[in-house]
Image: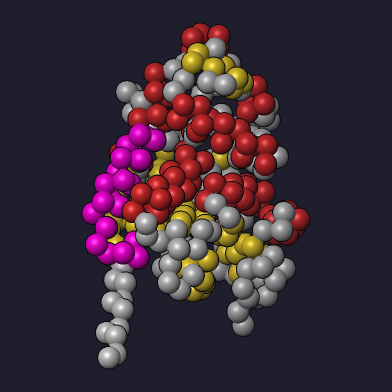
Amino acid sequence: MAHPPAPELTSARSDWRVWSTDASLVVERGDVVDAARAIADEVLAAVGAACDRFDPASELSRLGGEKTARGVEVSPLLADLVATALRVAERTGGSVDPTLGRELARWGYDRDLSELDAPAGASDAGRSAPFTVSVTRRSPGWRSVRLDGRTLTVPAGLRLDLGATAKAYAADLVAAQIACELGTGALVSLGGDIATAGTTATGGWEVLVQDVPADPSQQVFLPDGSAIATSSTQKRRWRHEGRIHQHILDPASGAPVVPVWRSATVAAADCVEANALSTAAIVRGHGAPRWLAEQGAAARLVDLQGRVVVTGAWPATDAQQPGGAR
C-alpha cells in the first residue's frame, strides 16, 4: 500500500517596526510563527533595555560621568554587547568605533529617528547646504574603554553608542534562539541585518539585495546558518541646522561620512561580522574594495551613480564583475 506523501512545510512570516527600522522574521515551520515572534520580542526588549541610548531608563543611559570613569559592574548582557563592540572596533582597525555617542548627538542624532526632521527629497546625504563645518582629528576612543569581566570603565569625555553592533548582535541572537527552542529554520531581518539559524529543507534562503527601490537589485542564495548585512548612506538620515546628515560617522573626525557608496553589503558566517565589514566599508570609502578583498569578504558595493563593485565570492552578474564597476 502506498504511503501518503509527507506534508510540505509551510513557512510563515511576521513583520513589525522596532528601533525606527523594519523587522521581519520567517520560520520554515509556520505553526510556530507566533512563538518565534514572542522570542524575538523578548530578546529585542532585553537588548533595548541594556543599551538603547534614546531610552533614559536603559542600563547604558543610566551609566556615565564619574561613576563609569571609576569603573562600574554591568549586567551580563550589556557586558557582552560592549565586548562585541570592542571586538568589532579591533577587527575593523577602528573604522567602527562604539564611542561616538557624543558626536552623534552633536550632529543632531540625539533622539529616536522618528522624532528627527526627516529630509523630504532623495538628494545625497551630506550635500545640502553650502556652509563650512570645522572638523578636528579625533583620537580612537574605543582604545580607552576597559571591560574587565563585567566591570566597565569609560572615560568621562566619551559616550558609548552600541547601535552599529547591537542590532546585528540581536539578529544573530534571535535567529539562534528561535532555531534552538522551536526546532525550525529561521531568518531574522532587522533593518539591513539578516541572520539565519537552523536547518531548512532547501539548505538556505533566497534573499533580495537592494537598499532602496532606485538601486540595482540582485537575488542571492544565503546558506543556512549564515548572515548578510547592508550598511546604507541613503537611510537613517535627518536634517540638522539646514543640512542633511546620515548616521555613519568617520571615527577619525567624528563627522558624518561623505558618501562614496550608496550601500555596502557583506555576507559572512554571522551578522555581527557582516555588519562590521559593511559599516567599515562605508567609512573607508574609495579604499573599501581593496580592504574587503584583503579580508576575503564576499561583498557588493553600490556607488553614488548606481554602479556595482563586488569582491571575494560574491556572485557576479552580467552587469557586475569582481574588482570593478560596470
Measured from the top left, where is residue 145 in percent x and y? 61, 22
- Choose between 144 and 248: the one closer to the eye: 144
Q: Taking 91 as reference, is 77 left or right?
A: left
- Choose between 12 and 317: the one closer to the eye: 12
Tell me the quadrant of the picture where the C terminus can be found: bottom right
The prevailing secondary structure element of the residues shown in magenta is helix
Residue displayed at 39% across by 35% down: 47
Measured from the top left, where is residue 40 in percent x and y? 33, 47
In the image, which residues are magenta?
A: 27-48
Q: Is residue 34 visible?
A: yes
Residue displayed at 52% across by 72% down: 220
Q: Taking 80 as reference, is 24 left or right?
A: left
Q: Taking 154 as reference, is 285 left or right?
A: right
Quick check: 281 above or below 217? above
Quick check: 173 above or below 106? below
- Choose between 245 and 293: the one closer to the eye: 293
Q: Is residue 245 visible?
A: no
Measured from the top left, where is residue 124 in percent x and y? 50, 55
Q: Is residue 158 magenta?
A: no
Quick check: 138 above or below 212? above
Q: Is residue 40 magenta?
A: yes
**In which quarter of the view is residue 33 placed?**
bottom left
Measured from the top left, where is residue 57 in percent x and y? 32, 23
Residue displayed at 70% across by 71% down: 322
